[in-house]
Image (tube, rainbow, N blue to C red):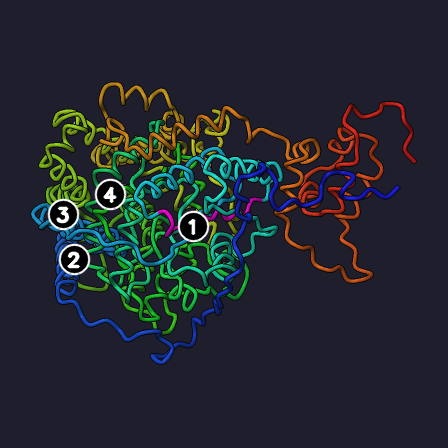
Amino acid sequence: MAVSLDQLGIAPSPAAGAAAGEPEPLPPVPDPAPLAMPVQSLKRFGPQEAAIAARQRDFRVMLARSFVFGGALALTVYGGFEMYKVVSISGTTFLQYVLLVLFIANFSWIALAATSGFLGFASLVARRFAPNPPPASPIATQTAIVMPVYNERTDRCFAAVQAIFESVDATGEGARFDFFILSDTTNPDIWIAEEVAFFALRERLGPKARVYYRHRAQNIGRKAGNIADFVTRWGGAYAHMIVLDADSLMTGECILALTRAMEADPRAGIVQSLPLILNRNTLFARVQQFAARFYGPIVAAGLSAWSGKDGNYWGHNAIIRIAAFAGHAGLPRLPGKPPFGGHILSHDFVEAALIRRGGWSVSMLPDLEGSYEEGPPSLIDLAVRDRRWCQGNLQHARVILARGLKWSSRQHFATGIAAYIASPLWLMQLAVGLLLVLQTRFVRPEYFTREFSLYPAWPRFDAERALSLFIVTMAVLLVPKLLGWLFVLGDGRTRRDAGGAIRLTLSAILEIVISALLAPVLMLIQSGSVFQIMFGRDTGWNPQRRDDGSIPLRDIIHRHIWHTAFGIVAGASAYGLSPYLFAWMSPTILGLVLAIPLSAASGLRRLGLGLRRFGLLLTPEERSPPPIVARANALTQELSVLGIDEADGLRVVHGDLTMRQRHIQLLPEAPRRTRGEVDPHRAVAEAKLIDAETFDEASSWIKGRERNIVLSDRALIILLAALPSGPAPTNAPHL
């Protein structure tokens, strides 16, 4: 018997949920405003293709670059010369030359961070004495605030959207901003939970709240494709878009400041804010939160000073001119297979480089307050995320030579690549050091070489100079942290909110110790990622854990057992060769040997909260949470009590008539099927629905991809809704 939509109550209702006399709610998505977004070429680009003329040189930026790169070069030359004198006390062997080259490569990396940190420190100090900005002007343009989501918890995402909406609305400029939740979710239960949360959000904010929701059936191009889909469908209606992450929070004043900065500079393509980490409770997350709060501004201010209008983009908490993005940020698909081919993973760097190539500026406001994000809760969670970033950054080797890029964009690519190549270089430096000691202890000297010499060819080191160089290296490495500590000590309010000078100093020491112990573990993790990528292993794209850092001990041991073994072998070898070598390598050895307990402790919530009770690793935002943070946390708690994320999507659509109507209303029109072409997965799902006698029976049969297919197909939803509730029959035969 045929069942009609009207009989099932599934007829789409454009005003579902609107009571008589109330204004009709806005549609789930606005009217289309398409905008072309052509795919860019990495092989062809000429000046005639730039949207606007190149910006005039900024001599302050040129001076800043001279200081940062010239100073880093001077430090590297000094360090390299000192290292050469360490290894050339009585001639230099091949392995010693290899050690020298590796040392110079690693030292140059920390030297650049040190000089950039000095510049950032000076910039922030100068801003303390800068005059107050002029009064703010009204917003004149329309901006979309977009949050791409992918299998995230709906309670926290929709709580954040509501908190941001309310904060923007409180500024009086709410009419200038539209909000979009752009879902690429593939989990059917989370998909339906998002729809439930969206309509609940609409009801809380009122029928005229300009908040929209769109779900893509296939997440083509991943996050970059998600944003591109928005631009091509609705970008024509907006001058700018502010891109959020699923864990982002931004105050209304911060959003207005970014918008005004964009409106004030018609050449601006991207203006990036500096998100601070918050809401973290585990030990590892609180260490990251502390470091980002007190050292991050120093690093960001230095980067902003020498980058100028040739800056970078971090993928979220930034405002983008849609004309610049649509005209120049259409990402090509790299030839070949992953990990180096296919979709560009670290798309944000590439988008910034292409927009800058097109003549638009990319800049940062490092001292803008009100921009927040969250960090991974444990060392293993960081490693999972870092693996994807590693592949994306190494993939930039295919982009760095693209035609027309600014040298600063190439520098950003090179820096991102070096951030991961540094780990295997450090590992190689340690290995070469051990080989040299082995050579000294077990290989007989070559007394009769081809060249006349009064001494045998024997690798020797200047121990006293080596110790001095080690101290210098540690000082250069710690410069950004020391400058961040000094800067906060000079800010009375921030110092008090961080627990006072003594607790702040103890927290800084604790952060340095924990980071030093974790550094060799991260070095091996990143080295393993680099080697895997080099051998062609793709990482894929998995959703991130945002909250819980607890991981079963069995999994921790599995992840870190070889790190521990490497540390034990290296420590035993170093001690057997020389107690002095063992003492020199002891920080690295200790971190590796303790990898398992360190990783387990990193995800402990009670340990992080215990330190907070003692006033350690404390940030001002913890002592006095910004109103938007408190509001978002309260909303998250309210939504989590409702259990939206724990619901069965099929059961919601089957049992809730209103939600079934709304779900069908959100579905796009199905493409016409070509005669003779049958989707086997859909055919199987349809057969199971026809064969089932109750909903519970159908639900037990329909698994995995079939659930998405059922929820995406109006005809299959009709079959699902027609099934009665109740347990599956136990004795009914099926032919």
The foreground one among 402 and 71 is 402
Which residue appears at 65% of the width and 33% of the height? 652
- Image quadrant where one finds the N terminus: top right
Residue 561, above or below 42: above
Q: Earlier in the sequence, mark 2 or mark 4?
A: 2
- Whichever of labels 3 and 1 marks the residue nearer the N terminus, that label is 3
- Choose mark 3 or mark 1, whichever is in front: 1
**Type of amino acid at the residue the image marks with label 2:** Val
Point out the frontmost of discs 3 and 2. Answer: 3
- The reply to whether dot 2 and dot 4 touch (C-beta < 8 Å) is no
Magenta residues, as a range?
174-185
Q: Residues under labels 4 and 3: Cα distance?
A: 14 Å
Q: Earlier in the sequence, mark 1 or mark 4?
A: 1
* 478 left or right of 236 in image: left
Is residue 514 one of those drawn in magenta? no
Dot 3 corresponds to which residue? 124
> Mark 3 to mark 2: distance in Å?
16 Å
Label 4, secondary structure: give it: loop
Q: Residue at x 49, y 59 (%)?
A: 234
What distance separates the C-alpha of mark 3 from that of mark 1?
Answer: 34 Å
| Kind of residue sitting beneath label 4 | Glu
In the depicted view, which residue is nearer to us: 373 or 463? Answer: 373
Given the image, on which type of amino acid does mark 3 rest? Leu
Amino acid type, mark 1: Asp
Q: Which mark is residue 178?
A: 1
Q: Nearer the viewer, mark 2 or mark 1?
A: 1
